[in-house]
Amino acid sequence: MKTTLQFFKDMGVCDGAYAVLERFFNAAGVVEYDYAAGYEVMLGMMGQLELEAAKSADPAHANAQAWLKWCYDLRDRPEAIQYFGDHVVENLFRTADGHLHESLPTAQDHRRRVFDELRRDHSACRVINGVTLGADGTETWKVIDLRSVDPEGYDAFVWHEAETGLNHRTSGIEEAIAFDAAQSAVLVQINAAETAARIERKVRDESGVFEVWVAVG
């Protein structure tokens, strides 16, 4: 990964560290320097860096270890890896569940199937049965839609609670409606989670040494 003074400035280096870098670049007579080599140089001059950091008026930057960490973290920043536009974009994609895929359509299909399965499981748990009692005490269960059914036609209502694995029974429609509303909210959460589930693509710097995952959809 290449670096320049403008690169460090655009990455947000503090003023104290920038002054040190500027002197280093000028002394070396270069406008561009290899990141990995520069990092090793920094490791070898920690004593001097501590003296420089101590001059900082900002307590958050008055520590050379903080400077070193900031510099180390550059290798994990997509904007740093891609700064010069000579990075290598690989055909390797990662879905939010950690699965790897060799194309974006494959990754998108995997994400869709994962959340479709969640919705199917949710729908199975959301089922509400209307119960009618026969004269002999027998029960007839029928899957009903609370939005369109006439509750007066049923003697009880039963649904399945996914977390406990138990069936719940009530003679009042209000409790069944409350359950249905809560389950509807879960569906909204699943849909929101799908929207937020990023797909990332692997990107390497031009040297192939450092790599990051960049969101693509």
Image (cartoon, helix red, strand yellow):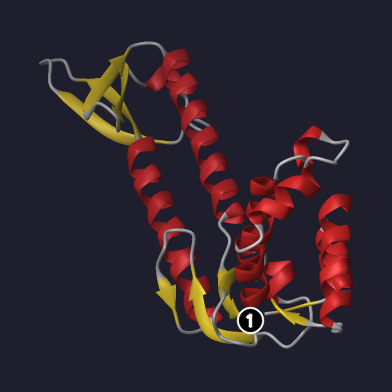
Secondary element at image label 1: loop
Q: Quadrant of residue 141?
A: top left
Query: Looking at the image, which residue sits at the far left?
Result: 136
Q: Is residue 135 above or below residue 26?
A: above
Instruction: Say if 187 sits above or below 149 in the image.
Output: below
Q: Quadrant of residue 98?
A: bottom left
Q: Residue 152, image x and y in percent?
A: 43, 17
Answer left or right for 122 relative to 81: left
Residue 127 is situated, as x and y percent measured from the top left of the image, at: 36, 37
Q: Residue at x 63, y 58 (%)?
A: 73
Q: Kindly identify the residue that appears in the image at 64 percent across and 68 percent down.
A: 39
Residue closer to the observer: 148 or 121: 121
Q: Is residue 38 left or right of residue 201?
A: right
Quick check: 142 above or below 119?
Answer: above
Which residue is the site of mark 1? 205
Q: Dot 1: within a 10 Å radius of its alpha carbon, few (fewer than 14), some, or many (20 or more) residues?
A: many
The answer to whether residue 215 of the structure is visible from this angle is no
Name the residue nearer the viewer: 205 or 25. Answer: 25
Q: Quadrant of the N terminus?
A: bottom right
Q: Residue at x 30, y 33 (%)?
A: 162
Q: Quadrant of the C terminus?
A: bottom right
Image coordinates for residue 14, horizontal then vertical, percent? 84, 51
Is 82 located above or below residue 89 in the figure?
above
Give the residue drawn at x 66%, y 52%: 47
Q: Amino acid at mark 1?
A: Asp
Which image quadrant for residue 113?
bottom left
User: For this rendering, which residue is in front, 173 or 117?
Assistant: 117
Query: Can you see residue 174?
Result: yes
